[in-house]
Image: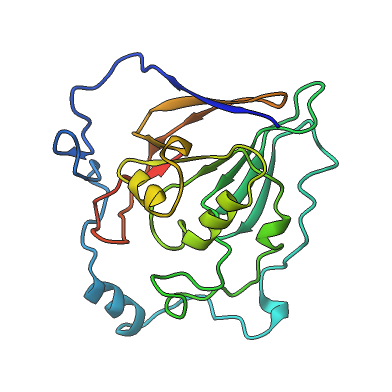
Amino acid sequence: MSSLVVTSIPREKALEKPAHHIGSPPTAFTNPWPSFDSHHSIPQMLSTRFGRERNFVPVPNTREELVPVRKPDWGADKPHTLRATWFGHASFLLETAAAPGASRGVRILADPVFAERVGPWGLVGPKRFSPTPCKLEEVPEVDAVIISHNHYDHLDVDTIKHLYSSRKRPIHFFCGLNVRSWFIASGIEPEDVTELDWWDSVEIKVTDIGSVRLTCTPAQHFSGRTGMFEIMLSAF
């Protein structure tokens, strides 16, 4: 069985205190740019959803009006190119080009959510319009999972637990600051989760497969499972 090694890449210059940190060590985070709109609240969201005129795209009534869903082939006919398979919303499977002599590339799953409905309880929360293009069990085995933030439509406990419990190869999770504790509470071993701050980089090396450099980059948003700014938002 292949092994997976995660190596931190030292920064060229460390910041004394990053602008997005609140506290040292950080207990909360802030969006440091003036373009961020901080006026978010449950009453405001309810007002936007139900209390004002909306010119949204009409909700589809028939399957023909939905985004076409095709069975993924994982780019099997192009093994030597970078491939991406979209599962809907923010969920993607990324696979690097296969190195000479390797059977495949490094596989990274981004914000995987396969639930029919997202929210704190199974019967409450937004329901998907389109079905996933495949079952979670049909997704090829992955080497790493990256999570941008902890909103329910990006971090689904059932999906994460299934990926971890059914793994036949090593799998590693990467997330922003203050999210690692959620993984540990969900049954993921501490050594299988790495938190990254903005501009932190790691090298992921998979034996007999290849390696890839992963960098955590800034994103503007807010958290939402508990407090609005208790965890850090990330892009990769």
Residue 210, picture quadrant = top right
**Quadrant position of residue 135:** bottom right
Please name the colour scheme applied to the rendered image: rainbow
Residue 222 appears anywhere in the view: yes
Instruction: Give above or below for 139 relative to 133.
Output: above
Image quarter hosting the N terminus: top right
What residue lies at 52% left-to-right and 62% top-to-bottom?
A: 158
**In this view of the protein, which residue sits in the foreground, 27 or 67?**
27
Q: Is residue 63 left or right of residue 37?
A: right
Q: Residue at x 41, y 39 (%)?
A: 190
Is residue 233 something that shows in the picture?
no
Q: Position of residue 66 (x, y in %)?
A: 66, 74
Q: Residue furthest right?
A: 77
- Which residue occupies the foreground of this view, 177 or 180? 180
Q: Residue at x 67, y 69 (%)?
A: 67
In this view, 219 is above or below 224? above
Q: Position of residue 202 (x, y in %)?
A: 47, 25
Residue reaching furthest top?
A: 12
- Report the residue that reaches farthest toward the left: 23
Please provide percent x and percent y for residue 65.
Answer: 68, 77
188 to the left or right of 141 = left
Q: Quadrant of residue 88?
A: bottom right
- In the image, what residue occupies the spot 73% across and 78% down? 64
Q: Position of residue 4 (x, y in %)?
A: 59, 29
* Count of marks placed on residues: 0
77 horizontally vs 139: left or right? right
